[in-house]
Amino acid sequence: MERRDAAGAVEQRGILGSLSLHGVETGHILRHQRAGEPGTALHTRLLRERGGIDEPLLLAAPDLGSFEDCVERTVKGAPVQELETPEGGVQRLWVCDASWTDEPPALPPVLLADGHHRLEAARRLRRTQPGAVSDRLPALVVDHRRFPLTLAATHRIVPGLDALRAVRAAERVALVAERPARPRRAPRAGTFLLTGGDRVWELSEISPAALAGRLRSLPPEWVELPAAISDHVVLPALCEDQGIEPRLRYTAGPPGPDEVGLVLPPPTWDQIWAGAASGAGMPPKSTSLGPLPIATGWTR
């Protein structure tokens, strides 16, 4: 599978196939993000209803190994499917020679970029009800070395939070400064953007006392990660001040003008790979990686 942007440049290329759930237990799949229980429960229910998934897991390979030769040979032929992407580019699909399926070469350990809840739901359901779901899931392994995935944060929307009262509460745990509403760029490392009513405030220099008090029960690898600081320090302080539960919604784009939310800085690739390799992973909803493949039925 190959994806090109509107100018015709390759932005993603990889192998679409199936991932064995048995192979997941070997540690070959590095999961950089912990799957939250609500998301896992939702996907478990969907798996029971549908008997499988259509959307392929997205995996990033630091090196495609022998599969690189397969890709280079295959893309010289005519694709069997072309689809326009939302950005005005094109996604192309080829069928590889059967010999690559009969004796597929080994891949190095790969990073699970998208699909943590789907994978965890399938693993649990397979253990408890073996006949309820297939032992293989559709998966796309992309060449991350030559065409790296895009990396952004996942942001938080907090229904019921009053923006102006939140600003006053934030001043007790951070340095707060109002910023121009437009243009709205990603916050720099160590800062957050509180948005609401078409206004934007930058939160920086989070109180060390608040960090120490609220993060001590978390894995030590998380103490500098934006999602951990957001979900366990900043947002609880703002919500507690207004007597509401932080029932968060998540978005890859910025919160809308009628929504109150927190825009996070993106983590770094070093943090992602280190968390995946150590097993600590990252807090749920830490990243937004892409682009995601367009599912059209050929994933079955």
Image (spheres, rainbow, N blue to C red):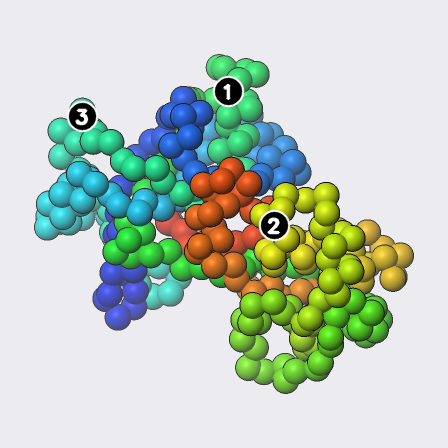
Residue 155 quadrant: bottom right
Eyeballing the image, is 30 above or below 132? below
Sequence order check, earlier mark of 1 and 3: 3
Which amino acid does the dot numbered 1 rest on?
Answer: Arg
Residue 148 quadrant: bottom left
Q: Nearer the viewer, residue 211 or 165?
A: 211
- Residue under the image location 61 percent in, 67 percent down: 190
Which residue lies under the disc numbered 1? 126
Which residue lies under the disc numbered 2? 222
Q: Is residue 121 visible?
A: yes
- Residue under the image location 78 percent in, 60 percent down: 209
Which amino acid does the dot numbered 3 rest on?
Answer: Glu
Answer left or right for 283 relative to 138. right
Which residue lies under the disc numbered 3? 103
The CA distance from mark 1 to mark 3 is 26 Å
Q: Position of residue 295 (x, y in %)?
A: 38, 45
The CA distance from mark 1 to mark 2 is 30 Å
Classify mark 1: helix, strand or loop: helix
- Neighbour tally class for label 2: few under 14, some 14-19, many 20 plus, Cα within 10 Å: some
Indicate which label's residue lies in the foreground, 2 or 3.
Answer: 2
